[in-house]
Image (spheres, helix red, strand yellow):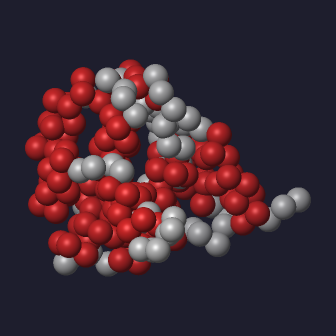
Amino acid sequence: MASRDIQFLFELGSLRNIPRAWIQHLGVPCASNLEHTMRVIFLALLIARKEGKGDENTIIKMALAHDLPETRTADLAYVHKVYSQTDDMRAARDLFAGTSFRDFENIHSRYEKRDCVEAKIVKDADNLDIDLELKELEEQGHKLPAKWKAMRKFVRDKKLYTKTAKSLWDKLQKANVAQWHMEANKWKKIPSAGR
């Protein structure tokens, strides 16, 4: 029988098979839970550094753990949550039980309670990743992001905790999704390219 650590690693891998719930409302492919988590980690670190607040080690662990119980509960969208409840705390407890990552149960609990600056920063990152993805979909010509604009503005005004997250949201609305690769292309970086 595999150790709990090995079982945990296989369970973690199962996140690639769990669709994000809001795909139902967008009707388009979106980032997997694992892809979402990667950007949340860096968004949270960015917010923390700009705010000058929070322990980065805790923030990284919290961002890693924030959606892990979804291996057991699935990902419920905002409509589902009106009618269904999950026991994320129990799922986290059972997920980390007997593993070398037992400390993550407490980290996840602190995230869910939003009773520390690190939890608020990670939740801001979790929300902002949705706006980044909506901006990417808009770039691809999808019309639904425009329909979500008022709701996402509500999230910006009423649900984001930090000034930095609100500022990032504002900048994101004017951002050019393609700028990073247009600036990094060979025509700008290698003047003799194509001669």
Could you tell whether 156 is left or right of 130 in the image? left
Residue 143 in the image: x percent, y percent?
32, 23
User: Can the viewer see residue 106?
Assistant: no
Q: Residue sitting at 51 percent across and 32 percent down?
A: 29
Q: Residue sitting at 40 percent across and 34 percent down?
A: 140
- Residue at the limit of the structure toward the front, as seen here: 195
Q: Please tell me how many numbered marks the rendered image carries.
A: 0
- Residue at the limit of the structure toward the right, as seen here: 1
Could you tell whether 124 is left or right of 74 in the image? left
Residue 91 in the image: x percent, y percent?
55, 47
**Foreground pick, 145 / 99:** 145
Figure quadrant of residue 84? top left
User: Can the viewer see residue 29?
Assistant: yes
**Foreground pick, 93 / 183:** 183
**Foreground pick, 34 / 120:** 34
Q: Residue sitting at 35 percent across and 77 percent down?
A: 56
Above or below residue 66? Residue 152 is above
Above or below residue 182? Residue 56 is below
Q: Residue sitting at 24 percent across and 27 percent down?
A: 146
Figure quadrant of residue 98? bottom right
Residue 18 in the image: x percent, y percent?
59, 38
Could you tell whether 70 is left or right of 26 in the image? right
Could you tell whether 22 is left or right of 124 in the image? right
Residue 151 in the image: x percent, y percent?
20, 31
Q: Quadrant of the N terminus?
A: bottom right
